[in-house]
Amino acid sequence: MARADGVVIVSERYWAFAGVDGSLREGRMPSPPDALRRIPLLRGLVRLGAALSPLFRGTGVARRRERLLLVFAVLAPLGLVFVPGRIGFVVGLALTAALILWLLRGRTLFLHGAEHRAIAAAEHRRLGSTWQGLELPSRFSTRCGTNFAALLLPVATLGQRFWPLPTATMTPLVVTALSLAVTMELWQLVQASSHRAARAFLLPGLALQRVTTREPRLDETRIALRAVASVLYRELD
């Protein structure tokens, strides 16, 4: 994930954060029980939570104030369940807009493109030439969280519209959790498929990346490459 002050790269076992100030922080990813990884729907939520863990850890990449802001952003919508519909919609929309603006602040868009470029360089074995600026792998990625968000929107909309049970106070929370879980299952299915028809599900997200990424400079690409190199070194050691 890209941040205003650096790039986080994660693998199954490790994470690394390379900062724009030249710093490098490293850590291990959480290892959920194998049983949870086999349960459909639940495994997707577990995987999603693990991917965000470097942000919420005390020794991770976010400062205490920032972690509190993230916790508030996650928990605040839960309180909107008890707010009248129209007011809850407006407040929820304002919270979402504020969170998006905060996530995309500063150099984030450029470092987001650098993150994709560095991962592509590793996958195509072009780390050295990319570091030197001789090659420019794509700044667009099929595994970007933007693609996940583009898939989540229609799934959540359909879930809310065709929810089969009587509406209750907690229904929006249940629909949200199920939408995330179903989208993650669909996301992993599409990622594992080599069929072109499956890849069509990623086209909206790839188009959206023209907004969520910018062409990075070489020094910004090198920030992401340092994080990639840190994770690869420990994975291959």
Image: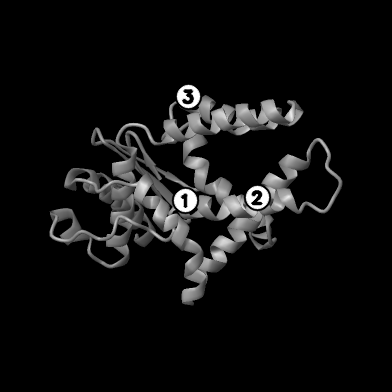
Residue, x 35% and y 62% (percent of image)?
A: 236
Query: Disc 2 versus disc 1: distance between alpha carbons?
Result: 18 Å
Residue density around tag 1, few if under 14, some if 14–19, many if 20 or more, within 10 Å: few
Give the CA separation, mark 2 to mark 3: 34 Å
Type of amino acid at the residue the image marks with label 3 = Arg
Q: CA distance from mark 1 to mark 3?
A: 24 Å
Residue to which mark 2 is pinned = 157
The answer to whether residue 32 is visible is no
Percent position (x, y) of residue 205?
45, 55
State the residue position of label 1: 145
Amino acid carrying label 1: it is Gly
Tell me what residue is drawn at x 58 percent, y 50 percent.
Answer: 153
Mark identifier at residue 27? none
Residue 114 seen in this snapshot: yes
Residue 103's image quarter? top left
- Against 68, residue 158 (above or below) is below
Q: Secondary structure at mark 1?
A: helix
Q: Amino acid at mark 2?
A: Thr
- In this orientation, which residue lies closer to the viewer: 139 or 125? 139
Residue that carries the numbered disc 3 in the rendered image = 64
Circle nearer the N terminus (2, 3)? 3
